Image (tube, coloured by chain):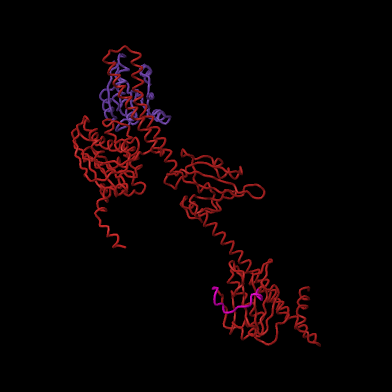
Amino acid sequence: MTTNTRVQERTRPTNSSPGVTGQLDELQLLRAAAQSCALMRAGMTVLSELDEEALLTTALDAVWSLLRADLVAFFLTTDQEEQPRLRALRTPEGSQIIQGRDDAPLSLPPKVLASRVPVEISRPWQTSPLSRNGDILRSVQSVLVAPLDVRGSHLGALAVGKRGPEPFRRDHVGMLSTLTQQVALAVDNARRIDQARLQERRTRDLLDSVADALFVVDDGLRIVYLNQAAAALVRQPVDRVLGQPVLEVLHLLDEAGSSTSPEARAFPRAIKEGRVVTETAALALGESGSSLPVALSVAPVKAPDGQAAYAVGIIHDISREKKIERMKTEFVSMASHEIRTPLAALQGFTELLLSRDVSPSVQRDWLSLMNEESTRLATLIEELLDLTRIESGRMRLRREPVSIADLVSRVVALMERHEKRPRFEICVPEDLPQVMADPGKLTQVLANLVSNAINYSPPRSRVRIRAQRGCLAKPGTEHLGPLAEDGGIACPAGISVAVRDRGLGVSPEDLRRIFEPFYRVHPAKAEAGGAGLGLAIAKAVVERHGGRMWVESSPGRGSTFGFCLPLDERSVRRQDGDGRFESRPTTDEGAVL
Amino acid sequence: MKTILVVDDEPTIRMLVAASLDGNGYLILEAADGAKALDLARREQPDLVLLDIAIPGVDGFEVCRRLKAEIAPHMPVLLLTGFDQQSYRERASQVGADGFVAKPFSPAALVALIDRTLAAPAV
């Protein structure tokens, strides 16, 4: 009843001709009711659209038919622009959504668009700023511009044009104001939804770009979200995992590989205890029986009542850390083993010497054994210290120009007295430039390669030492030795030195590990002696010089171990370039200029 | 006279063990690798084997397992090693070793252990 009265009140001025009959009144009332229904329907339709373009199209049609308009136009602000611009237009030719910023077929004065109350413009083509609009406005007699305001902000305006000479009726103004409110509300809603979607997509992209696996579970431990890395980790599509209990999706075992009670796991504990819980575990991968060492960190997300409503779990693959840890343990274990053996001899023979009466000749034998073992122990400790110094980056290089020819003859002089009487074949060009290197360390490297060549060959074998500019490693050699693991470092264009023997050679399996500390090619272990640190140290020293080490070998046919060192640019220029530079006529430079 | 097989790839350790046992009335056999040790054990049937774990070829654990399973289940085996870790001790008992000697060791203590092991009634 109230509604009717209000409609009537609002519509009364439009039929204010005196002496109206009751019949006419009733007709007016019916018309108003029908209008009101149509208006409500239009409003509902507009409001039900969640997409801005779709709702504008719907609104264009609603206004067009409700007001019997000849022109409908929506001017809207955007995120970037506060000045409303034409966004949707309906003319007798049809509707269009305007995307671009330029060449809008219709514009209205900014003052009109900014108005917070309806503005009516009669004969708009006569108003000077509007005359530019040409054909579109020429056909309409008056334009009513109503503001699109919602929740205190101004989104733009709706302009309605009519061709007929009579001005807008009051009920039209009323309808228009109702419609604009609804359109403004719908546009605002659509924009907020858009904003929320954008925000959600950004958050999703952000979480998907996290390298670690991320699971969100509810307080019932069911997965409500997982990122790409998490789906990859469990090797299942996202939608198959959503809603599943997290402890069924993630098969977590303790580090020894056996399963523990579910209550002990980080996810339930984080929910129950309401605090961040971390654990390291083994994540079982599929049916294969293999597992991945992981570190879990689960944080509760608390609801306003303080209870954990969700938990966010991050799973980090720690296989690299585990591998390093294992290597360290292995290193320490090997080092202590290598130290214990000579120590056993020293301690054992000392005890025997102190507790027994033995002949002077036996005493002498034991003492000389002890002497050998203490030398071995000292060498080993020195090597261990070297290796740890290099690995912790504390090894200092005393670089100076080093002649490779001098280096080779120094090492050969040292090794010629070896009991196996090796025969050396040396091939070092005289004009080889010097390298900037630590001479002592480089001697150690070459001596190690040469002594290996002798030790792993029969007596009186030939050992060839070659040096040259550029790389001596054959193509494909990069795949041998440990450097291939990190993608293969390009051979520095510099000087290569290679030591070739005709000895036992190394099997492909051994080749892969030959530069590892303590690794020894087994059958030859006793014969060659040493703790198996020489090559590891040599490789580290060469790499510290910016060079790389390589090996090629086949069992029974001998091995070639080599290294290349980068050339110091200044030393190359000094040695290669000087002569040429001096002989160059000075006019050359002038000619170029 | 009882026979003891000493297996170690380090000649110095073999000499030390031999010197420690010298004068105690044992006959010493020596081997430097796993294959040789198994061969000698099969042929000579020693009364006790003192076995280093880190030997070339077949390692000490495997030699011990085969000795117990294939050659002489009651032949006492003492494992000798520079790896003094719990995991090694556990594996030693898994393969049936009768004792574990960590390097460095006292010759007198080693002799005492060998005497004791040989005196114990075979299980």
Can see residue B120?
A: no
Q: Quadrant of residue A22?
A: bottom right
Above or below A109: residue A259: above
Check the picture and name the quadrant holding the C terminus of chain B: top left
Above or below A5: residue A592: above
Chain corresponding to purple in the figure: B
Picture coordinates of residue A429, whole percent (x, y): 21, 45
| Residue A531 part of the magenta-drawn span | no
Picture coordinates of residue A474, whole percent (x, y): 25, 48
Picture coordinates of residue B4, whole percent (x, y): 30, 20
Who is closer to the viewer here, A458 or A495? A495
Picture coordinates of residue A371, whole percent (x, y): 31, 22
Who is closer to the viewer here, A397 or A386? A397
Residue plotted at (50% across, 47% down): A315
Q: Quadrant of residue A100?
A: bottom right
Check the picture and name the quadrant holding the N terminus of chain B: top left
Q: Is residue A51 left or right of residue A578?
A: right
Who is closer to the viewer here, B64 or A154? A154
Can see residue A329?
A: yes
Q: Which residues are magenta?
A: A99-113
Give the main secondary structure, helix, strand or loop, of the magenta stretch: loop
**Outermost residue to the right:** A19
Chain corresponding to red in the figure: A
Q: Is residue B13 left or right of residue A459?
A: right
Tally the marks: 0
| Residue A111 part of the magenta-drawn span | yes
